[in-house]
Every structure is written in C-alpha cells, then in structure tokens.
Image (tube, grey):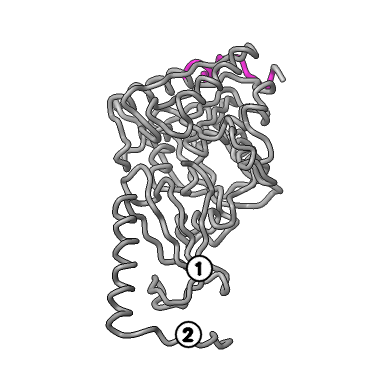
C-alpha cells in the first residue's frame, strides 16, 4: 500500500520485548509492506505503551490469511476460556508509578 | 588492474532539513578518479538492510552513493531503524518538506566530496519513489531522477492530502526540470497500471524528458531480493535501464542541470 494508514486499538495488558515485560496500552495495526517478512504485504501489529512515550514495542508481521485465522482463534479462545472460567474480574485502574 | 574494483562503505553524518545532523549510509569506489553522486531514498518501513545493499551496488558501478536515514530524528543511533519506522508510521509519517530538506542535505554532502564530478542522481523506491518524483520537481542540483514504483504520485482520494503531504506530486510535474526514469510492475496495486499511464500522460502533455518501463509478471518492489516479490529477470532488465540512464545523464561530460538553472 505504501501508506501511513494505521488502526489504533486501546489495550490493557502486558507484552515481553527486548527489555523484558512491559505494560502496553496501544496496538498500532496496519496492512502494508513489511520490514522483516519476505511477503509483499503483511498485517503488522506494534504493541506499545504510548502513555510512557511509545518508544519500545513488541512487533509482529503476519500474512493476511494467518492474521484472519488468528482473529478467529482469539475469539474462540475468549469464548471457551470465559465459558470455563466465568466472566473476567474487571481490571483495577492502573496506579501511577 | 583487477576486473573488480574495491569500495568503502560507512555511516557518515550529514546535515539535513533545518541543518539537523543525522546519519547516512555512504559508499564510494576506492580507486582514484572522480565519481558522480546518487542519493538513495528509502521506503516507508525504514532505513533497511536492502537499502544499504542498493547503496553498495551503486558504488560497485562507479558512483558515490548515499542514503540518508530519513527517520533519524525519532531516536538515537543505537535504536533499530525498524523501531524508528514504526514510531514514524504511528505518528502519520514524515512531512514532505522535511524529506526534501534531508535529500537536499544528502545532495550537498555528495557535492562537497573532493572526488565529486558535480553530477547528481536521485533514486527512490516505493514511498521513496514518490519522494524522488517530488525531489525531481522541486529541488535544484539534480541531473537525473529514477522513480521505482512510487505510489501516491497521483492522489485520487483527497483525504490522503494533509499537512504533511499537502500536494499531490503529479501537480508539481510542471516544475520537473531534469530527466525522469520510471520503473513499474504491471501487477502493482500502488501505483496501478492506470495511475502509471495517467502520470505518463501528464509528462507527455507537458513535454518533459522521461522514459517509463513497465514489466509484466512483476508487482511492487520487484528489485527487492529480500521479498517474495523479487522477480530476477525483470529486476535485471530494470537495473540495466537504471544504469544506462545514469550513465547517460551523470557522465562527467554530460550537460549539468546546475549550469542550466
């Protein structure tokens, strides 16, 4: 695509990057040319903490087909997991550090 | 003299837009003589390894080539260029004016070298092809420009224009003042074959010096040996076209656009 089109998703969670575990608050999602993959286009996700400047990220580059399959597996895992464990306990507000 | 000539490649400081100092990848032949310069404009994902390979390929063919790191302001030199590219993307990209300032700075670096002929070419890939088109239309001191599959030269959706990219490159074509070579894959989605045809129509209507080459069986980035999109046969012919073009317009005896401006 050669574009700067990015979908932003607000997140509550953690990811493990080159400096170890970190809290994340954002996923930048786009379908464009990759940096590392050999594919022409990839579905890329950068997990970052924009609240802390967004300088570190955990990145993935996925084929379009595998990304769609992943979406289905995420939805399926949530459904089966919530059925087994019950409704999730609401997250506490993140305390200032 | 050996059939093959040596070259030296290194990361050098250059002064870009607003005089900001950044990094550039620079390679040139080590033999004695004068060499024309070529600026390599990298693609949206960033200042990648393949870009450095292109710089060395140009040096192998007798040019002093430089690729400015267009995202250097986003982080320190120890940070991975792909991380800087991700931040730039999340921020909506780099303003065209800043890119043009950095390309002008890279041109100045090449001109300042003691073994420079004074002739300068620019080549860009993907978004860098679009930037190359803009540079060919708006910067001085360029003798030949090569746009490799630059997307969004024609902007069909006005929503793609914004403060960072305020003008469609095609609307700058009237100012194009040096020869332009275009290399395109007919299976590319950006630019499409139709957009390439419409770009050519504008160049032809304005009487510009250009040559376009289109390749069947190739899409976007078909020179890129690190992508599945690589098409060796088309890429070999494309590179031959690129080097023939640079030989024609960057030879020391060729008329300089500087003198004509």
For residue A14, above or below residue B241: below
Q: Position of residue A92 (x, y in %)?
A: 51, 88
> Which numbered tag is attached to residue A26?
1
| Residue receiving disc 2 | A91
The answer to whether residue B101 is visible is no
Q: CA distance from mark 1 to mark 2?
A: 16 Å
Left or right: residue B206 compared with residue B121: right
Categorize mark 2 by other alpha carbons within 10 Å: few (<14), some (14-19), many (20+): few
Residue B96 image point, x, y percent: 64, 42
SS at badge 2:
loop
The circle drawn on residue B198 is: none
Determine if the magenta segment contains residue A50. no
- Horizontal side, residue B3 vs residue A34: left or right: left
Q: Nearer the viewer, residue B245 or B156?
A: B156
Q: Which residues are magenta?
A: B247-259
Q: Position of residue B190 (x, y in %)?
A: 47, 34
Q: Secondary structure at mark 1?
A: strand
């Amino acid at each position: 695509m050669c574009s700067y089109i990015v979908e932003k998703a607000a997140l509550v969670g953690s990811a493990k990057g080159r400096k170890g575990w970190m809290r994340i608050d954002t996923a930048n999602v786009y379908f464009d040319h990759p940096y590392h993959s050999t594919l022409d286009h990839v579905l890329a996700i950068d997990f970052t903490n924009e609240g802390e400047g967004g300088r570190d990220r955990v990145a993935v580059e996925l084929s379009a087909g595998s990304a769609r399959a992943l979406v289905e597996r995420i939805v399926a895992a949530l459904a089966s997991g919530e059925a087994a464990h019950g409704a999730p306990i609401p997250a506490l507000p993140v305390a200032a550090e | 003299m050996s059939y093959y000539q040596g070259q030296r490649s290194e990361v050098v400081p250059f002064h870009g837009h607003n005089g900001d100092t950044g990094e550039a990848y620079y390679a040139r032949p080590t033999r004695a003589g004068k060499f024309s310069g070529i600026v390599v404009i990298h693609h949206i994902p960033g200042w990648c390894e393949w870009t450095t390979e292109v710089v060395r390929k140009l040096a192998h063919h007798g040019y002093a080539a430089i690729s400015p790191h267009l995202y250097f302001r986003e982080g320190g030199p120890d940070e991975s260029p792909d991380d800087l590219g991700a931040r730039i993307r999340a921020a909506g990209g780099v303003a065209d004016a800043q890119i043009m300032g950095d390309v002008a700075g890279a041109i100045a670096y090449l001109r300042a070298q003691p073994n420079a002929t004074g002739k300068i070419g620019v080549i860009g890939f993907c978004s860098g092809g679009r930037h190359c088109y803009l540079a060919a239309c708006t910067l001085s001191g360029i003798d030949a420009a090569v746009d490799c599959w630059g997307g969004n030269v024609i902007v069909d959706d006005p929503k793609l224009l914004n403060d960072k990219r305020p003008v469609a490159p095609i609307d700058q074509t009237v100012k194009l003042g040096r020869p332009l070579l275009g290399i395109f894959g007919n299976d590319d989605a950006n630019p499409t074959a139709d957009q390439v045809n419409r770009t050519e129509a504008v160049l032809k209507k304005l009487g510009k010096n250009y040559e376009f080459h289109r390749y069947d069986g190739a899409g976007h980035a078909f020179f890129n040996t690190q992508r599945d999109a690589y098409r060796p046969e088309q890429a070999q012919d494309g590179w031959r076209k690129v080097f023939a073009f640079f030989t024609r317009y960057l030879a020391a005896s060729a008329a300089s656009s500087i003198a004509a401006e």
